[in-house]
Amino acid sequence: MKKFISIAMAAVMSMSAVAVSAVSANAVEPLNTPVQYAQVARASLATPKISKAESVYGGVKLTWNKVSGAAKYRVYYKGRKGWTRMVDTTSTSYIDKDVSSGRNYTYTVRCISADGKSFTSGYDSKGKSVKYIAAPEISKLENVNGGVKITWNKVNGASKYRIYHKNSSDWFRVSDTTSNSIVDKSVGMGTYTYTVRCISDDGKSFESGFNPKGLSIRYNQAPKILETNVVNGGIKVIWETENNTNYRLYCKTEGKGWTKVCDSKTGVVTHKNLQPNKTYTYTVRAISSDAKKYLSGYDPVGMSAKYVATPKISKTEVTYDGVKLTWNKVAGAEKYRVYYKDGEGWNKLADTTGNSYLDMGLVSRELSIKDNSVNGQYIYTVRCISSNGKAFQSGYDTKGSKANLGNECPEIVRVDSMHGGITVSWTDVCEDNSKYRIYVKEKGSWKKLADTTNNYYTHKNVKAGQTYTYTVRCVSKNGKKFTSIYNPSGVTFKYKTTDKTRDAYIDYLLKHESEWLPELKVGNVALAGVQFADLDFDGVPELIVQEAGNEEYYLKAKVYTFKDGKFSLVGFDDYRTYIPNQLTYFYDKSAKKYIINAVELSTSNVDRYLDCENYTLNYDGTVLNVRGYSCAHLALENWGLEYYYYNQSGRTTKQAYNATNMSVLGNCVNAHMFSQFVYCSVDGYPKLWNSYSETQKKQHLTDSYNAFSYDKY
């Protein structure tokens, strides 16, 4: 660089001792000869004065006053051996480009003749000094998360830097810094031009010039990831997109850096083949169409998701109490959510920490007019959720697993002792390729009694005073395969046992029929009849008397009790005079108590409307407490099926209806209560009860009493 030219090449300034109007511009001037300097000055033009010496883009710019009569100017710099000629010019400014940043330079100027052969003025022997600070050069502009990152070279001698961006034709200050990079976070989508210059520590003066053209970049915001959802087989990443923009998706795991997943235009990618119970973090950046250049920054933090594999249902077992689902335990799963499918799609069934669940049919399964494939079907899926139930941890099988219902379960409807033994009758549900197998329980295990194609069987050689328990299931014609489920508790019957309370009870009923016998008629909705059920669990069942009905809400069943030899109608703690007529006993193992659930089905138009109301029934031996907790109403309208749901808060959603039912019975098990209905009126025989002899009436009532049973806990 600068500038130690040999003396032979330099024009060393000196002044002649002869007083003339002009001296040779090539002569050597003894600069420290004031007399000679004064003599020359009297014959010369005014001495040019450098008014400004400043660092500009590309060098040091010198500016001096215009001297009247001057034809030309000669610019000098001061080197190690004195003043050295730089350039001749007719201008009043000059940029010295052969400079190094951080060094001090001293300059002077004098007037010369037009041909450059003689001096026409003196010069400032002290000169004008300046420390040259180079203009910073931007080395890199890049889109990063939240803005544009500007990087430039460090400049020797620089105290501070000021960054500008251009708006139309003007430069605007962005920021001051002592670093050699910043991120301009004030940007939006668009093209930005930047330049940098050096400034003083206090920021009040410029120390360098700047690149007047600047360097430009189009800013694209770092794509924002909207969701990272664990789906069946991977993690689904969704991010914001711009039209006609390509993107590159990256992921990283703990202890490792970013790795490319794939390039995409859609903004939706499912990352597959992941390791279970591992957290993956994702980020996205825009890239050029040829995938060779980045067009945006990226979020260095990213968005994470822990990949938890989708549970797979391994078994859907139809049992007497419902459909039992079993699935694999999933590493990293905090909880599982079980869903069922109906005409509306997937619905939440229950949350559990185990890997099995029993669907007891407590929820509403809506029918579909458009898609008959789901009607009457039991289809399930499972997904992993967080411990608080607020976030999904995994995907789910969208097709689900269907339970094979097979034959209906034969339900025992009657047990009697009128045919030379114990006769068990059940619902006739067998298909043509099946038959029935009846069992009796001996020493805690089921023992086959017989196979039959009839829907009844008489167990002979039974012993008086003994208790027998029966169950029935369907089997194939060859008897080698079961084709239905069965009641695991069965129905227990007391055969010719001694029971003074029972005998007194039945004797009173026969002698005082007018106090309890329902009106003998036949209704569309309910038949007249009686049954026994122990509502207060004191060992003596109450008599439930159902009246025939064919109107809305006419399923009336009155309750009578027999205590200490006294028969009386049971009252209620509110306005009611009847109980719902379909009772199911549940046992809450946590609370260690029985819950009697009552269901009332009613209609005002059997072809168009159906109401199903759910109640709990509690009898303390004094009054009955019946409390409704939910109701579902189905209406067949001209435009299709309509469902309406209610709970104690009023009109509600199906989800809230289901949740209400689950809160009441979800923690219970079925106690398998059996209560034998004695028909008093049937189609064609409205006065059926009156056609029985006293012996038959007594036997019907006694058998019904003896057949009442439920699981004891």
Image: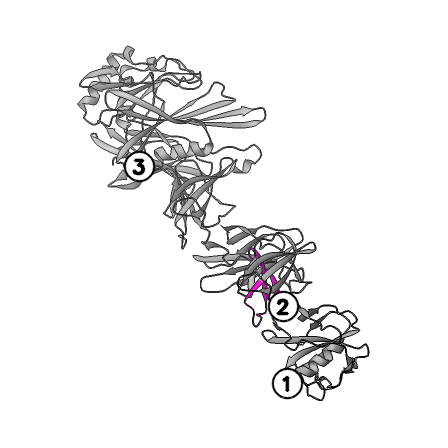
Mark 2 or 1 closer to N-term? 1
Mark 1 Cα-neighbour bin, 10 Å: few <14, some 14–19, many ≥20: few
* For discs 3 and 1, the disc positioned in front in the rendered view: 1
The residues colored magenta run: 135-161
- What residue sits right under mark 3 in the picture? 489
Q: Is residue 498 left or right of residue 237?
A: left
Between 533 and 597, the residue placed more toward the observer is: 597
User: Residues at badges 3 and 1 in contact (C-beta under 8 Å)?
Assistant: no
- What residue sits right under mark 1 in the picture? 81
Mark 3 or 2 closer to N-term? 2
Between 88 and 430, the residue placed more toward the observer is: 88
Say whether residue 363 is visible. Answer: no
Q: CA distance from mark 3 to mark 2?
A: 94 Å
Mark 3 or 1 closer to N-term? 1
Provide the secondary structure element on which disc 1 rests.
loop
Q: Is 141 part of what is drawn in magenta?
A: yes
What amino acid is labelled 3 in the image? Answer: Ser
Provide the secondary structure element on which disc 3 rests.
loop
Image location of residue 75, percent across then percent down = 71, 76
Provide the secondary structure element on which disc 2 rests.
loop
Q: Quadrant of residue 572?
A: top left
Q: Residue at x 82, y 79 (%)?
A: 115
Q: CA distance from mark 3 to mark 1?
A: 119 Å
Between 7 and 663, the residue placed more toward the observer is: 7
Q: Quadrant of residue 173?
A: bottom right
Q: Residue at x 36, y 47 (%)?
A: 354
Question: Any mark on residue 508, and which?
Answer: none
Q: Residue at x 56, y 71 (%)?
A: 157
Say whether residue 515 is visible. Answer: yes
- What residue sits right under mark 2 in the picture? 135
Q: Residue at x 36, y 23 (%)?
A: 581
